[in-house]
Amino acid sequence: MLYIKCPHCGLRSQNEFAYGGDASVKRPELNKEISDQEWDEFVYLRKSPRGKHLELWHHVSGCRQWIKVLRDTSTHEIFNTYKSEEKVG
Amino acid sequence: MVQNYRLDKIGLVNREKKLSFKFNGKKYFGYEGDTLASALIANGVHLVGRSFKYHRPRGFFGAGVDEPYAIVQLYRNGETEPNVRATEQELFEGLEAKSVNCWPSVNFDIGAINNFLNIFLPAGFYYKTFMWPRSFWYRIYEPFIRKAAGFGVASKEHDKERYEHKYEYCDLLIAGSGPSGLASAYAAAKNGARVILAEDKPRFGGSLLTSDVSINNQSGKEWADNIITELKGMTNVTVKNRAQIFGYYDHNMLVMSERVTDHLPKSDEFTPKQRLWYIRAKQVVISSGSIERPIVFGNNDTPGVVLASAAKEYMKVYGVLVGKKPIVFTNNDSAYETAIEFKKNNINPIVLDSRQDSNSEIVKEAKSLGIDIKFSHVVVAAKGYKKVKSCDIAEISEDKQNLNQIKNIECDCICVSGFWTPTIHLASQSGGKTKFKEEIDAFVPDKSKQKEVTLGSANGVFTLEETLKTSFEKGFELSKEITNNNNSQQIPKVSEKKHSKHDKFWCVPLPKGKKYKRFLDFQNDVAVSDIELAIREGYRSIEHVKRYTTLGMATDQGKTSNLNGLQLVSNIENKVVPAVGHTTFRPPYTPISIGAIVGREIGKHSKPTRKSPMHNWHEKNNAVFVDAGVWLRPRYYKRGNEGLFEASKREAENVRKNVGVCDVTTLGKIDVKGPDAAEFLNRVYTNAWLKLPVGKARYGVMLREDGIVMDDGTTTRISENHYHMTTTTAQAANVLSHLEYYLQLVWPELDVNVVSTTEQWAGAAIAGPKSRDLLQKLFPDTDVSNEGLPFMGFVEANLFGVNARIFRISFSGELAYEVNVESDNGNFMWEKIIEIGKDFDLQPYGTEALSTLRIEMGHVAGSELDGRTIPYDTGLDGLVSKKKDFIGKRSLLKKAYNEKDRQRLVGVVPLDKKTSIPEGSHLVKDPKGKLPNPKLGHISASCWSVEHNNPFSLAILKDGKNMIGSKLYAMSPLKNKTIAVEIVSSHYVDPKGERVRS
């Protein structure tokens, strides 16, 4: 079980969190004309990298904040965690 | 009965306490402190089971977790447990055990015919033989194999024992209480670290219990006892015996199973049988020791062939002799300790040493004691079927390829030692690499991945002096990093006998013309010939060889067999062992019970049960409850002999005719607050929200980004910047996470806060033509007329001194209101409604009547909003704004979502107006059509329409919009029903919606 440092609460076990997928996905702006392809990429297409991955976790059974976690998908090493509004990289 | 193999003056068992037990129905005696294995051996019983494939007689091979085959079925306190190692199970008064994998008995086993048919049972036998004909697999092969395979039977009874889970945190977790474990624990604990020391066995000390050493002028056992006593007295230390760390997981989380009362006749009321510990440790010390590995020779599975270390442990710990005419067969010095121990107990062993000579201290001692030592000699094969009676021995050439003349000598046990294999399971599970250490012919941990270190013989260090030195240093160093303290301990003085080199010899060649089975893996009956065959057939990767032959599989996980298997593969392939590599070590190290994994989360405890504040009233008034997610909701209120159908029909009819009240507390409720709340709702819902006035509610639908309907519900503007959102019971948690996602990550600029208020409010839906009259009596000071409180209106009111919210919303399609009060007042509200409702023929109604009412009205719910439907499909397209953007809108442009014959919600009535249509039935044109019969749609919900007094269903049907009036068939192969139906409008009652506005 992963040990995730919530930037608001400190180190907590994985079972307090829900996984939220790729954190680099950006929702297209409202009312913007976009192509089908652009929309489909936003809704469906995700990379599945081996290695470093910036991802979202929701501290559901804690402070209920969405946080960003930089994790290695093959070793599970967590390099750093960030508040939702923090810019990463 | 006399224990013929019990020694008088040696061992740690309590001779004051005699225990009786039964094995295969026969009564025996042992002592407190025995294992089932030691007690059986004391009574001269060596035949415990039959082997997995060939049903060969099997006895004891090890004295602990190393045991591959002494596995029994255990009976304790009215329950039974399979897969128990006799060498680990402690004896208790009244213990009963039986042999497994034999029929009709262990002495006469019909399956043993496999032993003589073994030419037909080579590696991969199942794969080769049972492939054809295919149809035979389920009917003939599979049931046969099921019966033939396995070590015991699982109980079909409910397990009455209690199991617990525990979460723990520590600075240093130490797995194993041998010399390295004790030393590192002591050094770390004395330096202020929080330490957990776990020992798998009942007794602490590991090899110190049996080795002939002295530490600070004490025996190994005395030193270990003193350290343990001191550690137990320290508040920063937890010491656990009978506790095995069996798995090493991510981020230094380790799991330990503690067998709390398995060694007792039964558990007392307040003690669990087993406890599973989830331990998060800052540092881990793996001091798991090493396991002696055998030398492979002919018939090496015969009962009476044991590991030399096990023979020593049986003498020194249990005071038991594995035999009285022992052969000690070794390639190294450590087995001499066993020989010397025999000699000290007046038994004359013969030592066969594959080495040409050795002049180490211990060999000299053995010589001086007059022990018969034959160098350059090996055991060729054991003789005897159910017990070793003699063995063939021979001198072996220097290159170990040729055997000289074979001689037979009498013996009753063969104690074998092929040197030591470090137990690296935990280190390997932690993700760390392993490396092959040439000097010991075995793998040891290499670079760590997580925060762990392996010490002592688990790390390939076999001298006590070095082990204690590094362990004291490591314990101090690791604790210093955590506590910043600087209290180091003096490393004790050690005296031990120096050992000379072992012989790199692991398998005795077959003499010419002999075809003895030479087993590598005793648990899975894998012999040298099986591996040779697998390689001849082209298997190269060690992982493939493992799966094809089953080498190193099952509960044993190759503890005694892995390295010999690797030696064999590398010999045949002309490679070195490290080039072959080893298979993956998987948790658990030994089997753990399902009960321990599940813990207390069984039956109703597997999830929380949520009850509304009115639950007690429902219970008292004969409610029959249904699980709605984690909530318990009244399904119907039983009167007399009513069943579900009659009761729900009566309740629904009463709503249509008079008035009913339903507990709707379970609905999800979310407070949405802030200056941008309206803008936020406008983006979340498909319809427009900017112009909703204060004091009004609106029905809304929200989508996922892919255009699928996520949830629906009403949201009410309580005040300027305060909205009260409701969600369906099932989606409440998901909707809150969804809203938080958009507020925190997508539109952080919106000044809005959301919080769940589901538990804060108790809700009662009052529905039916008389509901307004009832409401007026409940709230005499409030104007609840159609003008004062119109449809979708909201007002705050006073319910006999209690603050209440009244929403004029309807789920049933009738004139209806929902009254909310703070949860603590829920029961008060409910009882008031019931009391005053008497004048209006009010009846409470449950979820079944609620469903009936919504279905015949054509209101969609979870069964239509099933994660596969878009607004159009469920007839909600009128609520989709064309003007503004919202979550998921762009997806609605998808081609598939705009096909002309897109599926759509319809009503379905059976032509005979009698037969209820099973939910999930498929709608087809031709009931006798060729398979696969094209499915046009499915029945999503069914009820008995109380308005029309006939069955009515909702369905999602292809081109549903144009299908009204057509005749189709509803088919349910599950219920074996085919029903002719007519497609009608989904609004079966009050299609214009006049009642809710009346």
Image (spheres, rainbow, N blue to C red):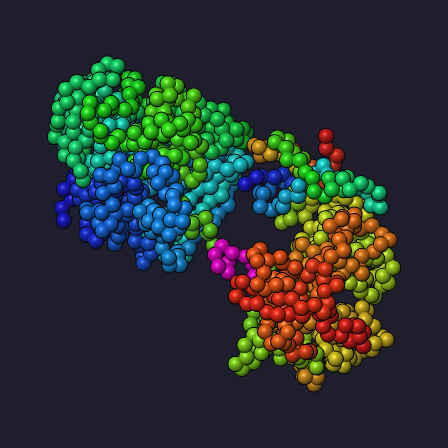
Report the quarter where the C terminus of chain B lies. bottom right
Indicate the position of residue B559 as horizontal and vertical percent values.
Answer: 35, 33
Indicate the position of residue A37 as horizontal and vertical percent values.
Answer: 76, 39
Q: Is residue B419 visible?
A: yes
Residue B606 magenta-drawn? yes
* Quadrant in the picture for residue B725: bottom right
Q: Is residue B866 above or below residue B582?
A: below
Q: Is residue B12 visible?
A: no
> Going 33% across and 42% down the picture, which residue do you hit?
B202
Residue B76 magenta-drawn? no
In the picture provided, is B264 more to the left or to the right than B634? left
In the picture provided, is A25 more to the left or to the right than B77? right
In the picture provided, is A41 more to the left or to the right than B213? right
Indicate the position of residue B586 as horizontal and vertical percent values.
Answer: 44, 36
Q: Which residues are magenta?
A: B601-609
Please tell me which residue lies in front, B592 or B879.
B879
> Going 39% across and 19% down the picture, which residue do you hit?
B575
> Going 57% across and 39% down the picture, which residue do you hit?
A2
Please tell me which residue lies in front, B708 or A52.
B708
Indicate the position of residue B589 as horizontal and vertical percent values.
Answer: 40, 38
* Quadrant in the picture for residue A40: top right
> Going 49% across and 28% down the picture, which residue do you hit?
B432
Q: Count the labels in the image.
A: 0
Q: Is residue B270 above or below residue B181?
A: below
Please tell me which residue lies in front, B445 or B778.
B445
* Quadrant in the picture for residue B424: top left
In the picture provided, is B815 more to the left or to the right than B370? right
